Image: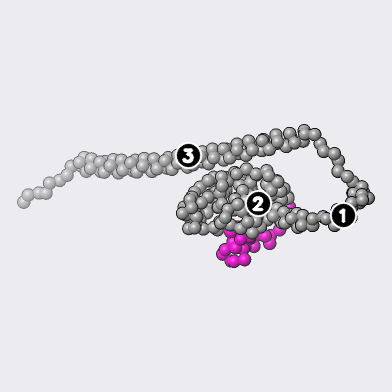
Amino acid sequence: MNQAPHHKPHEAHWTLRSLLAAGLLCVCIVATALSATVNADRAAAERETQKAIANEAELVAELANYLAAETAEMRNALDAPRLKPAKSTHALLNSEDALADFVDFDFTTLTIAKLEGEERTCLARAIYYEARSEPRIGQLAVADVVLNRVSSRLYPNTICEVVFQGSHRRTGCQFSFTCDGSMEARLNQRKWKASEQLAGAVLAGIRVPISRNATHYHANYVDPYWAPRMTPTASIGTHKFYKFPNRRTVAAAPAAM
């Protein structure tokens, strides 16, 4: 009877070594591919970081140039010849025309002053609740968005109406702090005072279009549904800013932030 052929031991060892070598080669290929992917993702993230830094640096430079020009203009105004000192209250009361001045006084100026005070408070609230933890440039950007909406025909004509637009509806508020209970929390007095001061400065004319005509923004850790339909304008601090891309998409783009 014929006997079955026997495999030599060294042939079995050679086959095992070949399989191990092939397995190790596959592992090396997969590891190389994964490493390349990680490096590519890391490089992309680094490029995005550098782009964001460059963008913010450009915005800071624009703001610095603007404030330098404002400072120079203010210095020239202070160096100009001074007007004569105003009359004292006692002198005004004792003047012959005091009664006539009282009768002719335009009391609507007091109402205007009150309205301006309310507008400043509304702008300060937007700055405080939306960006109190942001650097000054980020707070200026939020204020700029509010004023851009006031200037737009698509939104109300006053700061308070813009800030509180839709706040009477549960899901219609334009600025989330006006309807999510944020204003019920205790104020940080230091940051609130800084927000009031900044709002006053902005309304006095210390304003630069830092948001680049943006009417919308959102925190960089959220992804609102309306963002893809808008045109990005800037990324400042933890906020991303947008404007309407063109007239055809204005009607379709949402107003809420």
Which three-letter amino acid code belongs to the residue tagged 2? Ile
* Residue tagged 1: 100
Residue depth check, mark 2 versus mark 1: number of the one nearer the observer: 1
Can you give x and y, in whole percent of width and height, for residue 148 in the image? 59, 50
Residue depth check, mark 3 versus mark 2: number of the one nearer the observer: 2
Q: Residue furthest right?
A: 94
> Residue visible at 62% across and 39% down?
63
Answer whether residue 246 is magenta in the image: no
Q: Residue furthest bottom?
A: 169
Q: Quadrant of residue 136?
A: top right
| SS of the residue under disc 3 | helix
Instruction: Give the residues in magenta.
Output: 164-189
* Residue tagged 2: 127
Q: Earlier in the sequence, mark 2 or mark 1?
A: 1
Q: Earlier in the sequence, mark 1 or mark 3?
A: 3
Q: Residues within 10 Å of mark 3 (few under 14, many from 20)?
A: few
In the rendering, which numbered label is found on residue 47?
Answer: 3
Which three-letter amino acid code belongs to the residue tagged 3? Arg
Q: CA distance from mark 1 to mark 3?
A: 70 Å
Residue depth check, mark 1 versus mark 3: number of the one nearer the observer: 1
